[in-house]
Image (tube, grey):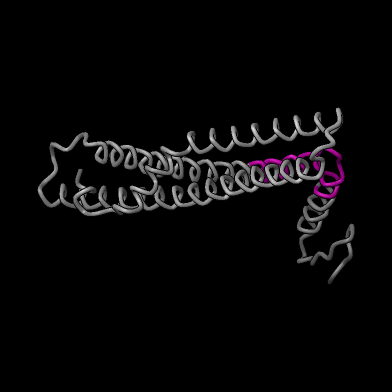
Amino acid sequence: EKVQIGGMVSVLLGDKCVSMFSTLVYHALKMFLSRSSMRKVLERHQHCSTSQQNNANLTHNLEYWRHEVMQYKEKLAYMEERLRNLNGENLAGFEVKNLQNLENQLQAGVTRVRARKMQLLMEHIQDFRKKELLLFQENELLKSKLLEASSTHAGSVTTETTSQDIQDISSIKASSGKLQAFTQENESIISEAETTLQLGCPRKQLRA
């Protein structure tokens, strides 16, 4: 016979103790779950589970970054040692083959450096020539203006004309001075650049 007791189905097996025990357990569990303390326990358990997961993720991240730092330290130590070798230091353990490879690397580096230097010198020469041409044209323009003014007002020089002539002469002198100073200032640079460009980069120079 089946009897509904306290919301659960119990089977009476001839012994009423079974049904009574089931009823007591059911009601006790229901009362226990209904208490607010049980909800707090469940919430605390959930919080602890989340915290444990976060701690696990943090530990994983720390291990990852510790590994990255170690790799960068090794790379830095390697690069520092290579720099010392290129400067001719710590070569005691090098064999002839290693020294030859190092020399080849140095020669290749010197070639690139000199090629870049020649490129910059060419750019400087072109820039200097352009500025020199502009100053020369400015100087010639002022001279032509002065000659034109002198021929126009020949025989009828006034105070205003004389002042203008003086101003033009001053401008010509200033322009000529700038042209001369610019040429002297950059003459050595241009000469060195042209000499370097004429000589180029022969192999003997690379070994010097």
Please provide percent x and percent y for residue 203.
21, 54
Give the farthest residue toward the front. 155
Viewer-side residue, 25 vs 203: 203
Please provide percent x and percent y for residue 198.
32, 53
Please provide percent x and percent y for residue 18.
76, 58
Q: Main secondary structure of the magenta part?
A: helix
Q: Say left or right for 56 vs 41.
A: left
Q: How many marks?
A: 0
Q: Say left or right for 158 vs 195.
A: right
**Residue 7 vertical position relative to residue 170 in the rendered view, above or below:** below
Viewer-side residue, 63 vs 149: 149
State which quadrant residue 170 falls in: top right
**Quarter in which the N terminus is drawn:** bottom right
**Quarter in which the C terminus is drawn:** top left
Whether residue 36 is in magenta: the answer is yes
Q: Residue at point 78% right, 42% down?
A: 149
State which quadrant residue 135 falls in: top right
Whether residue 183 is in magenta: the answer is no
Please provide percent x and percent y for residue 4.
89, 64
Q: Residue at point 65% right, 32% down?
A: 174
Q: Residue at point 80% right, 30% down?
A: 162
Give the farthest residue toward the left. 96
Q: Say left or right for 5 vs 180.
A: right
**Residues in magenta, as a range:** 29-51
Viewer-side residue, 6 vs 51: 51
